[in-house]
């Protein structure tokens, strides 16, 4: 199962980026709930912001360290924005890291995500990467036994592959981070000030 999904993801990464440029996603395709969505905020928030990200993307790391927690305090926690994380791993170690965040569950998701971003250069270059990622999980309370069970079950692997395929083939996502704000696509890092302007335009 592991080797099959590794080959599948690598084939998707190499083959679907070209096709992605031909697609213009409908808002309904973007906004529809997807298996594995990690959702923060109130369901009735007037703005929904979706981030496609990779855990070994330096621009994603910068967004999460410099912008995300201010965004969370000012907009997500106050009911103004509903925020959804979606995986778009840039390589196989990033896919394994994504599995760890979901294995951790909602209560530990952000802590695991923070730890992976903080150490991404180490685990993404490690051999085997899965062992290094497991060690990151242990540092924030996800035991190796828990992670091993999640990986061997295969469900998280399949979800990561399917999210990547849908994002690339249907939504035209080509890199990370890519954001959709009420269905409107924004590519690349984005400041809190710019987000405030975009949110105001959706009032």
Image (cartoon, rainbow, N blue to C red):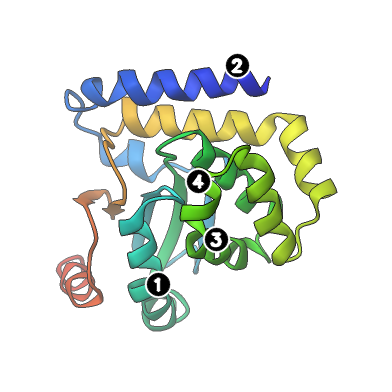
Q: Secondary structure at mark 4?
A: helix
- Distance of mark 4 from mark 3, alpha carbons? 14 Å
Foreground of the two, 25 or 44: 25
Locate the C terminus by quadrant. bottom left
Is the residue marked by circle 2 packed among few (<14), some (14-19), or many (20+) residues within 10 Å?
A: few
Residue tagged 4: 124
- Name the residue that disc number 2 marks: 4
Which circle marks residue 113 in the picture? 3
Q: Which residue is mark 1?
A: 65
Residue 28 locus on image (x, y percent): 33, 39
Q: Are marks 4 and 3 in contact (CB under 8 Å)?
A: no
Q: What secondary structure is marked by label 1?
A: helix
Give the class, few, some or many, for how many residues have Cα within 10 Å of label 4's Cα (few <14, many ≥20).
many
Q: Where does the image place residue 121, in percent across and percent down from the top left?
A: 46, 54
Between tags 4 and 2, which lies in front?
4
Residue 199 relative to residue 86: left or right:
left
For this view, does 65 lie left or right of residue 156?
A: left
Q: Position of residue 96 (x, y in %)?
A: 59, 40
């Amino acid at each position: 199962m592991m080797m099959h999904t590794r080959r599948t993801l690598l084939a998707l990464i190499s083959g679907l980026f070209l096709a992605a440029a031909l697609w213009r996603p409908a808002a309904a395709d973007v906004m529809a709930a997807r298996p594995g969505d990690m959702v923060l905020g109130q369901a009735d928030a007037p703005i929904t912001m979706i981030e496609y990200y990779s855990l070994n993307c330096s621009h994603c790391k910068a967004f999460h360290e410099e912008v995300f927690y201010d965004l969370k305090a000012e907009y997500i926690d106050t009911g103004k924005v509903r925020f959804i994380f979606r995986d778009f791993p840039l390589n196989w170690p990033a896919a394994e890291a994504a599995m760890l965040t979901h294995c951790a569950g909602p209560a530990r998701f952000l802590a695991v995500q923070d730890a992976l971003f903080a150490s991404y250069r180490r685990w993404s270059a490690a051999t085997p990467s899965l062992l290094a990622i497991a060690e990151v999980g242990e540092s924030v309370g996800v035991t190796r036994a828990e992670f091993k069970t999640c990986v061997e079950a295969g469900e998280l692997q399949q979800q990561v592959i399917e999210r990547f395929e849908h994002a690339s083939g249907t939504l035209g996502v080509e890199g990370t981070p890519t954001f959709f704000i009420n269905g409107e696509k924004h590519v690349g890092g984005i400041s809190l000030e710019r987000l405030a302007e975009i949110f105001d335009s959706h009032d």
